[in-house]
Amino acid sequence: MRKRLISVLLASAMALALAACGQSGSSTGTDGGADTSTDEGTGTDASGGSNILVAYFSWSGNTEEMATYIQEQTGGDLYEIQPVTPYPEDYNECGDVALEERDNNARTEIQELPADLSGYDTLFIGYPNWNADLPMPLYTFLEEYDLSGKTIIPFTTHGGSGFSRTIDTIAELEPDAQVEEDGLAISRNAVPDAEGEVTDWVSGLGI
């Protein structure tokens, strides 16, 4: 009787040990949340993502759509430049505010600016062409950082005026960056059908 009791106890102990091993194995390997490995072959940034940043300001959603196309093609990180005080939704009211900001050389306050862009080598910068100039939030963004040695690739949406001289303005704000002159300007009315054009443009950049 005593030997039988000892055998039962030993068998129970072995079963518990095997169960514990099985649970330990299932908690590591397949659970993505437990995997902290990194790919040393890829670039990193302040967010631990790509070495490409697609930063954009969009009022109507057209520039945002372009930015999304670019992000899908490059695998870069996406950042929206958002004013603390949103622009009016009415087209004419927004135009009046934007013109007043330009005339006053205002620097629109931006919410949640990234603390550090040092991990990015290439920045796509997107914006609508407002009054033949950069929207003032772009001045705020570009003056916040020293982008020396980085490549800046502009893209814009417009109502017929293309880039105007906004690429030159970006080069003036970031004189030690390499500003790509072959940016992409798309009419605001053509944006919904522009995915193929954006794809071809990004492919031609050789990034």
Image: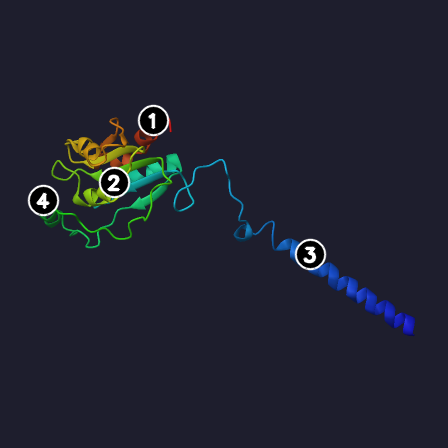
Q: Quadrant of residue 45?
A: top left
Pointer 3: residues within 10 angstroms few (<14), some, or many (20+)?
few
Residue at mark 3: 22
User: What's the residue at 31%, 36% (across, down)?
Assistant: 123
Spatial CA distance of label 3 from label 1 is: 51 Å
Q: Please, what is the three-letter code of the amino acid marked with disc 1?
A: Leu
- Left or right, 50 with respect to 105, comes to right
Above or below 86: residue 64: above
Q: Earlier in the sequence, mark 1 or mark 2?
A: 2
Residue 187 can be seen, yes or no: no
Tell me the mark number nearer the camera, choosing from 1 and 2.
1
Above or below 10: residue 205: above
Secondary element type, mark 2: helix
Secondary element type, mark 1: helix
Secondary element type, mark 3: helix
Residue at mark 2: 63
Secondary element type, mark 4: helix
Nearer-the-camera pick, 157 or 136: 136
Spatial CA distance of label 1 from label 4 is: 33 Å
Residue 99 can be seen, yes or no: yes
Q: Earlier in the sequence, mark 2 or mark 4?
A: 2
Q: Please, what is the three-letter code of the amino acid marked with disc 3?
A: Gly
Which circle marks residue 205 in the picture?
Answer: 1
Q: Please, what is the three-letter code of the amino acid marked with disc 4?
A: Leu
Q: Earlier in the sequence, mark 4 or mark 3?
A: 3
User: What's the residue at 27%, 39% (across, down)?
Assistant: 146
Spatial CA distance of label 3 from label 2 is: 52 Å
